[in-house]
Image (cartoon, grey):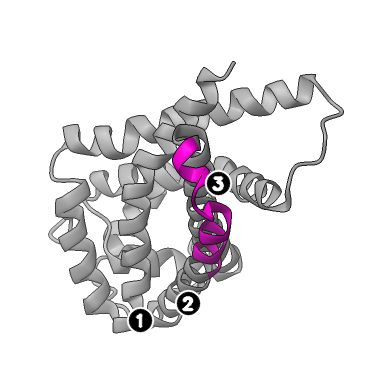
Amino acid sequence: MKFLPKVQAASGAVFAFFLVLHLATTASAATGIAGFDNTLITLRSVYRPNIAVELILIGVPLAVHAVCALVQMGRRFKTRPNPKPHWHIRVHRWTGYYLLVVIIGHVFATRIMPLFGAGPTATGSADFSYLAYSLVHWPAFFYPYYILLGFCGAVHMCLGVGIAARVLTPKLAAKLPVQKISTALAAVCGVIAVIGVLFILSNAWHADRSRFAEYDAVYDKFMPFMKPLNH
């Protein structure tokens, strides 16, 4: 039984490497659209130089972490009522629940769908204009979606690092104020993530729209029920 929390903690720690870079990309929106795209290209060369590295750093750890989370949730449900955990555990779980709900759609929309873009503008990858496309066309849905995604991702990561430290290195964690450090990091990174997302929302309306026709075709192919509300 103790093996599963260790696997979950270890997979989360590996995935956190990508999340830190993802947070940096989000924060770079404060420098403008060009700064965001330049950061995205630079950091992609680190976590996504080829499919093997992407699977090792992102795909496999994410899948393992999510499966472990679902199994743990099932066990807690079967053994109800459970003692109320510390507030930071509850916040870690609440943010994780949101991420579990949206992660498959997020991966599909941002990683898989852009591969099928066609025409002279197609690159096979999403850039800032891809974010802008969704934000300009469906703001009522994507504004709160991205704000929550950024906040929950940052907070879950930071609190999770503290939890992972106690699970994987309990003796070392006992000597350090791990909970206070992870809580402080969660607060700071949560604010940074939200600010970064707010810059993304603001910049979206000024983004280059030369690839929007490409994205129209991609959405028509995979999500024909989502018709652009604004053009």
- The reply, left or right, for residue 153 in relation to residue 144 is left
Location of mark 2 (residue): 195
Specify whether residue 81 is painted magenta: no
Q: Secondary structure at mark 2?
A: helix
Residue bounds of the magenta highlight: 171-187
In depth, the one of 38 and 173 nearer the eye is: 173
Quarter of the image with the C terminus is: bottom left
The percent position of residue 82, horizontal first and vertical second, equals: 82, 30
Report how many numbered discs are placed on residues in the image.
3
- Looking at the rendered structure, the kind of residue marked 2 is Ile
The percent position of residue 196, horizontal first and vertical second, equals: 42, 74
| Corner quadrant of residue 58 | top left
Mark before the other along the chain sequence, 2 or 1: 1
Contact check, label 2 and label 1, Cβ < 8 Å: yes
Location of mark 1 (residue): 30
Residue in view at x 52 percent, y 39 percent: 166
Q: Residue furthest top?
A: 1
Q: Is residue 138 visible?
A: no
